[in-house]
Amino acid sequence: MTEPLKKTRIDSQITGMAGEFLVAGKMFKRGLQVSVTMGNAKSIDLFVHNPKIGRTFNVQVKTLRYKNCFPIRRENVTANDIYVFVVLNKEDQDEEFFILPGQTILNNIDHFFGTCYTGEKPSTFPAINYGPLKEYKNNWTLFDLDGTE
């Protein structure tokens, strides 16, 4: 009798790197300059420079294999960073990208985190919910803004 095949868990580091390189590719396609930090810059995954407007963005990429909540604590959200949330999906499906400034998240914690911080006892595993991110899907034009808006 053969034993059933165990499902192997995909390394979270591979998932994270997949998201970072996919985002970098999208940036290059838009004519932006990108530097992948490979973990050498604490909490910054990509430096993205738009030479047309002379602005550099600090980008944090959060990646999941499938639709779910993105684990992150509000204390780790930085107002001046841009967050790109990536859902890889199945191999035969397109990835999903949700792009928004950290300040937007911080301005409405309850909207993005749901009940993580509103109960008597805050969650020990806070996360940004998938639903509120939908309005920021493919918001790549955020990298065209010069900061004077």
Image (cartoon, grey):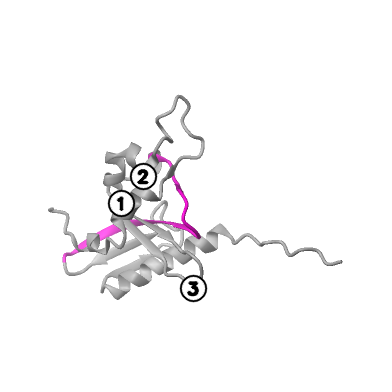
Which residue type carries mark 2?
Val
- What label does residue 70 carry, if any? none
Residue for badge 1: 81
Q: Label 3 near label 1: C-beta < 8 Å?
A: no
Asked whether 4 or 22 is in front, the reply is 4
Q: Amino acid at mark 3?
A: Asp
Left/right placement of residue 128 relative to residue 125 reads left
Horizontal side of residue 5 vs 101, given as left or right: right
Q: Secondary structure at mark 2?
A: loop
Q: Residue at the far right: name it.
A: 1
Foreground label between 3 and 2: 3
Q: Which residue is located at x 36 percent, y 44 percent?
A: 77
In the rendering, which numbered label is found on residue 92? 3
* Neighbour tally class for label 3: few under 14, some 14-19, many 20 plus, Cα within 10 Å: few
Looking at the rendered structure, the number of numbered marks drawn on it comes to 3
C-alpha separation, residue under disc 1 versus residue under disc 3: 31 Å
Circle 2/circle 1 CB separation < 8 Å: yes
Kindly identify the residue that appears in the image at 41 percent across and 46 percent down: 129
81 magenta-colored: no
Q: From the top left corner, tell me how far across and down residue 79 is, in percent.
A: 29, 45
**Vertical comparison of 115 with 84: above or below:** above
Specify whether 118 is left or right of 100: right
